[in-house]
Amino acid sequence: MPDDAMKSVTVRGFAKINLFLDVTGRRADGYHLVNMVMQSLDLHDTLRIERTGRPGKSRLEIRDPDGRFSGLEDDERNLVLRAEKALRERYSEKIPQEEGLHFTLEKNIPMGAGLAGGSADAAAALIGLDRLFSLGLSDQEIAEAGLSLGADIPYCLTGGTMRSQGIGEILTPLPKLPDCTVLLVKPQGSASTKEIYTALDGGEILHPSWETFSEVLGAGDLQGVAGLLSNVLEPVTAPMIPDIDVIRRELLAAGALGARMTGSGSVVFGIFAEEEAAAGAQEKLREGHPEWDIRTARPITLDTVRAHRFAEEGE
């Protein structure tokens, strides 16, 4: 390794919620076509990538939010390691192929939640490797490397308030969500995304109105947005995880302007105009349901994601 080479980089991967999720069709290759509005949150995982300077297999060390070691992962199915492999194959002449890397992932985003935790981590790996090896890739080049890994990855490479179409690769910036606090509630149950989409394909979809939702978001109407939160996967997932309907009702009873499942679940989020109201609802739900994972987050803009993507030493 050259003496002047960058030796490590630390990157944040931000969670998202779906304010609007419609499935508009299915391609011949089986990929579903979507029309979604994605919103970044300040909840994030942190990925540190270190060059070892010696031959070997790359390893991923996973830690919990308190910094405790929770596992060593070298399974190539892991999205961080798959992202590394995809970039190595695509830019083999620029990345030393024999050198192993050490990834350390501080995991804050719940898994199996519909918050794009895995996709956010893969996006962080792609962005971090681009900087670590001075590849100088464009946003489009990084997105092309990541799309085969998951439909949410192109969005996770950008963030903010964004419309996502096609199979997730067509992104259009939208007006930002008005200031609010989001309460995230994750029940204990889970269901596979594949199982959920299979069930969706077998039924009739009641499509929400994109034009109406786009109008209220463009007007900066938080109450209107909250009242039009939509997710066509929720009616399919809810019978598999009964707590989803319970959580949604309790969030609304606790004062949420609107509540909806994100992604394919299992997290249900509520939108609150005031931070104090969200904190009160959080306390109430925790008292009644200690088995649920309940936390608050705030929406962040595309500029905020860009400004805080790389962690500086000492932060």
Image (cartoon, grey):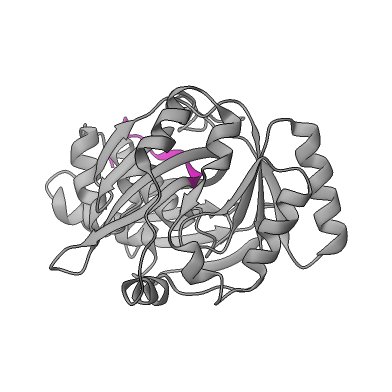
* Of 145 and 52, the residue lying toward us: 145
Q: Is residue 294 left or right of residue 27?
A: right
Residue 89 visible at all:
yes
- The image position of residue 295, as x and y in percent, is 70, 49
What residue is drawn where x is 15% and y is 48%? 91
* Of 139 and 104, the residue lying toward us: 139
Count the numbered circles shown: 0
Magenta segment boundaries in residue numbering: 1-18
Quadrant (top left/top right/bottom left/bottom right) for the C terminus: top right
Q: Is residue 207 left or right of residue 89?
A: right
In this view, the residue farthest toward the right is: 287
Q: Main secondary structure of the magenta part?
A: strand
The answer to whether residue 9 is magenta is: yes
- The image position of residue 193, as x and y in percent, is 41, 70
What residue is drawn where x is 47% and y is 39%? 39
Residue 187 visible at all:
no
What residue is drawn where x is 33% and y is 77%? 202
- The image position of residue 170, as x and y in percent, is 23, 42
Which of the 4 image quadrants contains residue 111? bottom right
- The image position of residue 236, as x and y in percent, is 47, 70
Q: Is residue 104 left or right of residue 81?
A: right
Quadrant (top left/top right/bottom left/bottom right) for the N terminus: top left
What residue is drawn where x is 44% and y is 46%? 20
Which of the 4 image quadrants contains residue 7? top left
The answer to whether residue 46 is magenta is: no
